[in-house]
Image (cartoon, rainbow, N blue to C red):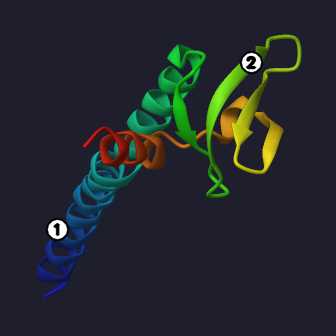
Amino acid sequence: MNNLYLVAETSSSMNNMIFFPLMFAVLYFFMIRPQIKKQKNEKKFQKEITKGSKVVMTSGIHGKIVEFIEKDNTVIIETTAGKMKFERSSISLEMSKKYTEETSK
């Protein structure tokens, strides 16, 4: 009777040893990795953007880039309300792509 209990306990602990790495792998490939890829694409877009590009900020403000200020990593954007200064990191890749697609039609 004792041997049977020992075998059941051993197989249960083996299932747990397999379950936790498997759960971590699923979390990594379905949640963490896509987020890292998205952040890399966003940084690349923000570095490659040029003067005259139409962009949308994360706050929802639409405008056209007029000037880059490299020393503090900001951009001057011209909107209908005038010129505004924003952090370069506040330019949204997704919203800017949609905006340029809509305006080019």
Q: Nearer the viewer, residue 46 or 23?
A: 46
In the image, taking residue 97 as reference, residue 16 lies left or right, namely: left
**Residue at image location 36% in from the left, 48% down from the top:** 98
Quick one: SS at disc 2? strand
**Residue at image location 79% in from the left, 21% down from the top:** 73
- Position above or below: 80 against 100: below
**Residue at image location 47% in from the left, 28% down from the top:** 40
Quadrant in which residue 66 is drawn: top right
Residue underneath mark 1: 11
- The amino acid beneath tag 1 is Ser
In the image, taking residue 10 as reference, residue 77 lies left or right, namely: right
Placement of the C terminus among the 4 image quadrants: top left
- Report the residue that reaches farthest toward the bottom: 1
Residue underneath mark 2: 67
**Residue at image location 61% in from the left, 58% down from the top:** 60
Quick one: SS at disc 1? helix
